[in-house]
Image (tube, grey):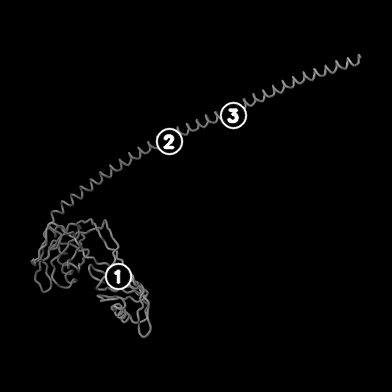
Amino acid sequence: MMAEGGLLDSLEGVKDEIIRQKVLYEKLVEEQAQLVKTNSEREQRTKDFKDRFVKITEGLEQAKEQHLETINSQKRKHDSLKQEEAELLEDLKGTETALEEQEIKEAEVEGATNVNTVVPKREVVFRGATVATGNPQPFDVKSRIKYPMEGGTALITFEDEIVARKIQSLQTHKVTLEGECYITVEAHPVQLTVPTLVQMDTRVCPRSILVSQLPDMDSEVILDKLEIHFGKRFNGGGEVASRHFQEDTRNAVLVFTDDKIALGLTQKENHEVSFPKKSKYKVRVTPFVNGTITRVETEALACPRTVLLTGIPGVMDADCLQDTLEIFFQKGSNGGGEISNALYNPPGQTAVALFEQDTGI
């Protein structure tokens, strides 16, 4: 009985110890859970602190960059203002220089107004025709355009624009030669570069004179007599550096070595010069005006009645081939019509066609 009682006491003690250890275990588990929770909260606070630190650091970096950008922007504005100031000073100097040059030009123009005219006189007569007033016409210059032709090409000018357009639209043409032989040529429009605006700066040449109202004789004889006459100091002249005869206007230009000669001769204006078979002949001396082109505007213009033929081989004499081309393109069955002009340039040769206003080649 005693043994059994001691065993029971021992079992009860073990049981109580188990319960006590269980309570301790649960307490430890609870404490562990609390520690885990506390650790998690600390980690979260640490993460929050790190995030705030990163944001504050980024904000500081952005503030620093904005500050630097503001400084750089102010520096750029300062440099720009300094540049503008320098440019304004440069413009002011340029304006002062331009004013000085303008004053010089005005003085030259004022001196030039003392010259009655630099245009040679021409005889005119009233033919009885009148025009309406109120619409002033612009100054017109007759166009003379040089068109370079390659070898193996031809220019055909028709009397009717419609025929030229038809020939161009057909493009390829088989031109029959002798027998059953033929050549194939291509038709293209002719594009010309035409000036639409020309501006010039003109000035009176101090050492040159323009001599007009000259007699009708050989140009070299005229130049010789003018050089002899105006080369003498007795006639108000001096040493002649060069001379030139203008075939289109039949005027002469003399250039002296001394700047003072031309002014004296133009002030007198009318001079009597000895020419062969004429005792004395009165010529007119005016200042020679030279010009420099300052502005040119052009446009591409298609010649309406002229067709360019290419790919023409040199299979026969040039004149015979040109006649063959004219005969072929005159026939209505070939799409052609009446031809006002034609020009053929054989292969291996160069030629220049001259176009004038309202004309063909």
| Residue 19 picture location, percent across and down | 77, 19
- Disc 3 marks which amino acid? Lys
Front: mark 3 or 2: 3
Q: Toward the viewer: 117 or 238? A: 117
Quadrant location, the C terminus: bottom left
Q: Position of residue 123 (x, y in %)?
A: 10, 66
In the foreground, 30 or 10:
10
Comparing 343 with 161, the one in front is: 161
* Residue contact at pointers 3 and 1, CB within 8 angstroms: no
- Nearest to the observer: residue 282 or residue 326: 326
Give residue 116's quadrant in the image: bottom left
Give how far across and how far down residue 96 sits, in percent: 25, 43
Mark 2 Cα-neighbour bin, 10 Å: few <14, some 14–19, many ≥20:
few
Asked which quadrant contains residue 249, the reply is bottom left
Asked if marks 3 and 2 touch (Cβ < 8 Å), the reply is no
- The residue pinned by badge 3 equals 47
What amino acid is labelled 2 in the image?
A: Asn
Q: Position of residue 264 (x, y in %)?
A: 14, 58
Q: Secondary structure at mark 1?
A: helix
Quadrant, the N terminus: top right
Left or right: residue 274 versus residue 255 is left
Secondary-structure class at tag 3 = helix
Q: Residue at x 26, y 75 (%)?
A: 341
**Distance in Å between CA atoms under marks 3 and 2:** 37 Å
- Can you identify the residue that label 2 sits on? 72
Badge 1 is on which residue? 165
**Circle 3 Cα neighbour tier, 10 Å, few/some/many (<14 / 14–19 / ≥20):** few
